[in-house]
Amino acid sequence: MDNPYVRLTNEFNEGRLRAILSSGQAVVLYRLAIMSKDGDWILREDAEALGHVLATLQLRGARYRYGAPLELRWLTHGWSSHLEFHEGGLRLRCDFVTRPPRIAPGDLQALWEAPVRREAPIVSLPLLAELKKTNREKDYAVIGELARRMGDPRLELLYSRSARDLVRLAEDHPAILEHAAADRPLLSQIGHGREEIERLLDQERRALIRKNEERLDRYQRAARPWAAEWPRLSKELAGRPLPEAHEMMVARAAELLPDEP
Amino acid sequence: MTDRRDEFLSEEDLDLENLSIEELEAYWRLWLTQAQSTNDADREVYSHGVFDREPAVSE
């Protein structure tokens, strides 16, 4: 597939699996929607993987955007790194994490052992649904459609955004419902009917949005000294080769960006 | 009367499943090319990760 993000993913993975395409581009590869012009990857959490990704981006003439350096010191605490370059008239943005939000350590490990293979390795449908629990309303519509493609009643019960679907699933799979309700409280109210489940779905979505906003606020508070320095630093980085810019980023971030938010 | 279902995405999105890989690629390319028109507007904005906006850099 001549998708630059797919090509880049396969270059990141030359000789070894290091990068799994997630979020918007995974949605594209699942043929669910065309919804993002940026690329977003989960990287393997080791120095070799990060070095290979930086070397690949250096060949494209990439530059750092505001964000954490692509270094384990920050990525292991959930920070994200952001680079961009231009190619064939397109602005291509590359966003990286090694600890994606809302993904349990065991699920993250399993991702590396058995990624979904499409034109490039991508996150599974349930993990993609977790990643889409953001503070953007439109992502909950995507989760709703992802759930319908999971093909497993338990997973559909855990992720569906449709009260109609949930009522039907509960009728068809009462034993599975009982177990799933332990992980999703609104399922225990399904006997109260569709209207009540619609209300609880709205409430659940708003709670997830608030939770993600609080998570982002924590990082942004911790990054205030780094944000204040960025206008000056970005001028110093301009035009420098990526390895040199990276070293400068790391040195400055060591003083201003805490490891833990 | 037909059974209704809750709808999340547009007809165009749902039709992506019926495209060949070449058609999907061509559609995505066209979309991405058109989306470049908003590059100035979203220059400082982030769509992933823990940062939401690039601090202003004076020219």
Image (spheres, rainbow, N blue to C red):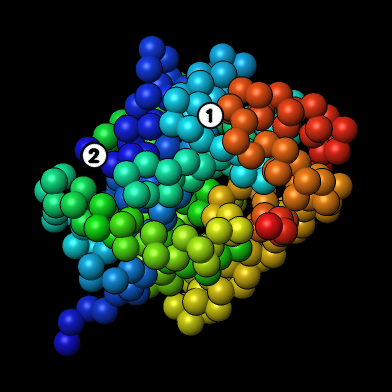
Q: Marks 2/1: CA distance?
A: 22 Å
Please identify the quadrant where the C terminus of chain A is shown: top right
Measured as percent of width and height from the top left, residue A185 is found at 60, 60
Residue A249, quarter of picture: top right
Q: Which of A195 and A226 is in front in this view?
A: A226
Residue beneath the point at 71% across and 24% down: A247
Q: Is residue A55 above or below residue B44?
A: above
Closer to the camera in the image, B37 or B10: B37
Q: Crowding at label 2, few (<14), some or many (≥20) Cα neighbours within 10 Å?
A: few
Above or below, A92 against B30 in this view is above
Q: Does A46 sit left or right of A247 as displayed?
A: left
Relative image position of residue A88 (x, y in whole percent): 32, 44
Q: Residues within 10 Å of mark 1 (few under 14, many from 20)?
A: many
Residue at the limit of the structure toward the bottom, as seen here: B1
Relative to residue A6, is residue A185 drawn left or right?
Answer: right
Query: Which quarter of the figure is the N terminus of chain A placed in?
Result: top left
Query: Where does label 2 land, which residue?
Result: A2
Quadrant for residue A95, please give it.
top right
The disc labelled 2 sits on which kind of residue? Asp
Is residue A79 something that shows in the picture? no
Q: Which element type, helix, strand or loop, lies under badge 1?
A: strand
**Residue depicted at x 18% and y 82%:** B2
Q: Helix or strand or loop: what does disc 2 sit on?
A: loop
Q: Mark 1 = which residue?
A: A43
